């Protein structure tokens, strides 16, 4: 998996396309056509599964899922005195949930996307996310007495730094000994999973009250919680526990930052140059290893930030569902699909994160009518659609190539640097 | 780990280096590699004496013996055997630190955890699925196709093994259907990564998502509301039989015979199959023309193509084989050991297998050593739960395989060298 050394006196081997080079082809092919077609095709195949295995109407199922996403909130505003069960109010809650998920998915998506742009596949978002949650819980429970804004900022900074350091290990190993980042980040994922599980189950972060029961960490200080910007005031001052928190602005800010760093800074230029062609970048005087390390650390920073958003804004403490080893159902892995579907651009990640956040909320069990589609299958349907999207997105370069052959669009080779 | 490895590349210089040549005879006894081997042994010995049945309670013993291991390691490094020397230093340090911790623990707790026969039999159980999947992964990666999708293929074997055993009412049918399901998923991976030249890691990631979705969906669709599929159901889920090896108990001396009987009795058929598969894989991979073809496709596909090897066919065959083997490991979990299925029951074992493949340096006996080590780490966790105060450390032990692999990949203990063309799609010209 490491780069083959150059053998002199042989015909040059055609180099495999890097992620960045593939991305370049997508850009040149232009348009939103392929991601949209990919998504539609994935939903189509998912619908076939619903029809063939469960004998349910796929359109009805998807309609039901859509109604649960909260996106039907637009146009039917909920009055603040409404009851919890009325439809507009449910839509409000759902939309808040979708946006909470969106916040985290944007950040985990960016964590994958940034590494992609440097030619690396950061499959370790989940580990970096977990390290971020642990750091946020640790700082959030230990530094009591600080003024609220400082405490929140410290928690966010700590989690971001923790994620950056965790991913930085993989970046450092890639830069120094050439260890493949996919292998190292998978290993770091599981180390994070088990160490975090230990920390909240018998370790120092466990809430003493939960010993012998389902292990959870202590709840973070109220001063460390992110301010809620949109919650529902139900019948006489009863607030739903989890409204939309400030983090959604942080996620949007991260999107802008991502775009600006990549496209408007020297760092972004060299990261992209390394992603397109490490040899050419090295020849042009760019330190490849430095960029590997930096790109990985920045990726991890996004994932660690995502972890702090979930802790500080949503759940306020860690439990084993966040640290369990059956990781693929979990949020940072969806980040891979977000980044791939969003073609590693800021706008694309925004849209893809919205899609997956809506899908996640829409298929959560409380939102589905068992007569239309069994709620316990919905999560699996999401995984299936997610897998199909990743599979087809990965193959779309070839499909594009075949389609556009007439237009003389050629896959770039390593010899011609397409920056 | 060194068994099964080919001889390290000999010094290919045309002229023999006379200066070292002359020194061979006097240095033979203190060959640095031997010093390092003794050092590694010292580290293991330091741990052994403090554990049952010996249980030395003095803190000095492991410190002195482990320290000797470190010193021998340093000597070996100075004399040029760097890799083995560092291994001895690591082994000695582990012996010292572990030994000190163990002597501080109470003897009762020790005997509750370290029951060697139980540890051995549990290790074999936990090793089996890892060994199948890692050997499978070796076929795929040796032919040049990265297989991140091992986890998904295992899960397919686990679910469809149980499903098939339930439907055909027999474990043979279950195993066959499980293997078929794993092979089919592998075929999808092969098609996307070989013919469509998708990035193999992205394709493998997608394969994992798909497997989680498919198995979870069908499982919930059939057994969702009914508490799952278990051996306690009606009719009970058929199981792969255990082979009784009670005759081992009659091996003299009595203690040895009892130990062998306690640790190896009731081995599952698939456990035996997995261990038999190791030498078979070695012979196929390194002693047959087929193995040479597979390896050449992974090292230099263009050269392989030039001499008339059908690179696509070899890669398809290898990837499908890897899916079938990984599915065997998955089927062992459901119809061989746990006798039930739950969502994502493989719980990352496919990734441990991938780690074992790398740690074992893509070689059958290396993979065997790595899976045994990882299996032992997994077997220790449930044993630690026998002592309340130690129960939680089982989770830290669960992280050990990944940490060891990370260190191995970093090149501190023996550098892993993947096949040269792994991960690179081949385009026929």
Image (tube, coloured by chain):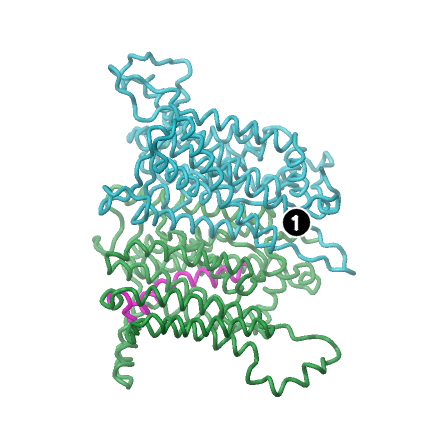
Chain colours: A cyan, B green
> Camera-side residue: A57 or A43?
A43
Does residue A34 lie above or below B127 as drawn?
A: above
- In the figure, B313 relative to A250: above or below? below
x, y percent for residue B215: 38, 47
A226 and A354: which is toward the camera: A226
Residue B49 located left or right of residue A344 = left
Q: Where is residue B370 in the image (x, y as percent from the top left)?
A: 45, 65
**For the point 40% across and 39% down, which residue is it?**
A133
Residue B44 seen in render: yes
The outermost residue toward the bottom is B25
| Magenta stretch encompasses residue B113 | yes
Q: Crowding near pointer 1: few (<14 within 10 Å), some, many (20+)? A: some
Q: Which residue is drawn at 69% across and 41% down?
A: A411
| A356 vs B44: above or below | above
> Magenta residues, as a range?
B112-141
Q: Mark 1 lies on which chain?
A: A
- What residue is disc 1 on? A16
Residue A241, by quadrant, is top left
- Numbered label tally: 1
Q: Residue furthest right?
A: A9
Asked whether B18 or B67 is in front, the reply is: B67
Q: Is mark 1 on a helix, strand or loop?
A: loop
In the picture provided, is B220 more to the left or to the right than B403?
Answer: left
Residue B232, image x, y percentages: 21, 55
* Image x and y of residue A236, in percent: 24, 14
Q: What residue is at 52 percent from the left and 57 percent from the top?
A: B319
> Going by the image, does A375 lie left or right of A190?
left
Give the main secondary structure, helix, strand or loop, of the magenta stretch: helix
């Amino acid at each position: 998996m490491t780069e083959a050394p150059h053998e002199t006196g042989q015909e040059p081997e055609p180099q495999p396309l890097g992620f960045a080079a593939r991305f370049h082809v997508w850009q040149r092919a232009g348009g939103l056509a392929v991601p949209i077609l990919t998504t539609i095709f994935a939903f189509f195949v998912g619908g076939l599964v619903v029809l063939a295995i469960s004998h349910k109407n796929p359109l009805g199922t998807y309609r039901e899922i859509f109604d649960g996403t909260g996106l039907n909130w637009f146009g039917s505003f909920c009055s603040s005195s409404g009851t919890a069960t009325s439809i507009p109010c449910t839509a409000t809650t759902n939309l808040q949930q979708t946006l909470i998920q969106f916040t985290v998915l944007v950040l985990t998506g960016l964590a994958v996307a940034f590494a992609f742009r440097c030619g690396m596949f950061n499959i370790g978002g989940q580990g970096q996310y977990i390290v971020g949650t642990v750091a946020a819980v640790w700082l959030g429970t230990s530094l009591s007495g600080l003024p609220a804004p400082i405490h929140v900022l410290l928690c966010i900074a700590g989690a971001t730094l923790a994620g950056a350091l965790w991913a930085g290990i993989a970046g450092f190993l890639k830069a120094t000994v050439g260890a493949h980042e996919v292998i190292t980040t998978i290993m770091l994922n599981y180390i994070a999973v088990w160490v975090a599980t230990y920390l909240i189950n018998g370790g120092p972060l466990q809430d003493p009250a939960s010993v012998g029961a389902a292990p959870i960490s202590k709840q973070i200080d109220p001063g460390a919680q992110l301010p809620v910007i949109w919650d529902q005031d139900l019948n006489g001052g009863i607030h739903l526990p989890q409204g939309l928190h400030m983090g959604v602005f942080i996620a949007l800010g991260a999107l802008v930052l991502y775009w600006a760093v990549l496209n408007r800074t020297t760092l972004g230029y060299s990261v992209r140059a390394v992603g397109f062609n490490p040899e050419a970048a090295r020849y042009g005087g760019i330190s490849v290893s430095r960029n590997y390390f930096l790109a990985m650390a920045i990726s991890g920073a996004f994932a660690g930030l995502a972890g702090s958003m979930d802790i500080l804004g949503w759940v306020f403490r860690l439990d084993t569902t966040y640290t369990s080893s059956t990781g693929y159902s979990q949020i940072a892995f969806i980040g891979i699909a977000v980044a791939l579907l969003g073609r590693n651009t800021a706008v694309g990640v925004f849209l893809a994160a919205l899609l997956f956040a809506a899908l996640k909320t829409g298929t959560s069990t409380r939102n589905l009518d068992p007569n239309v589609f069994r709620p316990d299958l919905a999560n699996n349907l999401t995984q299936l659609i997610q897998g199909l999207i990743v599979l087809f997105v990965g193959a779309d370069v070839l499909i594009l190539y075949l389609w556009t052959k007439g237009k003389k669009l050629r896959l770039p080779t390593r010899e011609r640097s397409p920056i | 780990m060194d068994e099964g490895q080919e001889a390290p590349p000999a010094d290919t210089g045309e002229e023999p280096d006379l200066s070292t040549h002359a020194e061979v005879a006097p240095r033979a006894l203190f060959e640095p590699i031997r010093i390092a081997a003794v050092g590694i042994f010292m580290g293991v010995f330091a741990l052994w004496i403090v554990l049952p049945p010996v249980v030395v309670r003095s803190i000095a013993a492991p410190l002195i013996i482990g320290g000797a291991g470190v010193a021998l390691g340093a000597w070996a490094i100075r004399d040029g055997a760097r890799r083995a020397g560092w291994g001895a230093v690591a082994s000695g340090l582990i012996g010292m630190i572990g030994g000190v911790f163990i002597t501080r623990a109470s003897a009762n707790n020790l005997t509750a955890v370290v029951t060697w026969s139980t540890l051995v039999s549990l290790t074999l159980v936990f090793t089996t699925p890892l060994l199948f999947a890692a050997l499978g992964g070796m076929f795929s990666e040796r032919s040049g196709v990265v297989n991140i999708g091992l986890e998904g293929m295992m899960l397919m074997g686990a679910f469809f093994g149980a499903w098939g055993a339930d439907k055909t009412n027999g474990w043979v049918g279950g195993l066959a259907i499980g293997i078929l399901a794993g092979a089919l998923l592998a075929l999808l991976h092969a098609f996307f990564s070989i013919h469509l030249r998708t990035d193999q890691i992205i394709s493998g990631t997608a394969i994992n998502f798909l497997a989680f979705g498919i198995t979870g969906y069908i499982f919930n669709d059939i057994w969702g509301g009914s508490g799952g599929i278990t051996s306690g159901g009606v009719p009970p889920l058929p199981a792969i039989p255990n082979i009784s090896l009670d005759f081992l108990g009659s091996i003299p001396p009595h203690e040895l015979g009892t130990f062998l009987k306690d640790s190896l009795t009731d081995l599952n058929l698939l456990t035996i199959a997995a261990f038999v598969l190791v030498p078979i894989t070695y012979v196929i991979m390194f002693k047959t023309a087929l193995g040479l073809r597979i390896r050449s496709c992974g090292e230099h596909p263009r050269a392989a193509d030039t001499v008339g090897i059908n690179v696509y066919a070899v890669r398809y065959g290898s990837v499908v084989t890897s899916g079938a083997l990984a599915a065997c490991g998955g089927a062992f979990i459901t119809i061989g050991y746990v006798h039930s299925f739950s969502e994502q029951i493989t719980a990352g074992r496919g990734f441990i297998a991938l780690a074992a493949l790398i740690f074992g340096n893509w070689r059958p006996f290396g993979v065997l050593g790595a899976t045994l080590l990882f299996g032992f780490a997994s077997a220790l966790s449930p044993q630690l739960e026998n002592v309340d105060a130690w129960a939680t450390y089982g989770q830290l032990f669960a992280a050990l395989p990944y940490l060891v692999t990370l260190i191995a990949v970093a090149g501190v203990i023996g550098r892993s060298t993947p096949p040269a063309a792994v991960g690179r799609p081949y385009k026929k010209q």
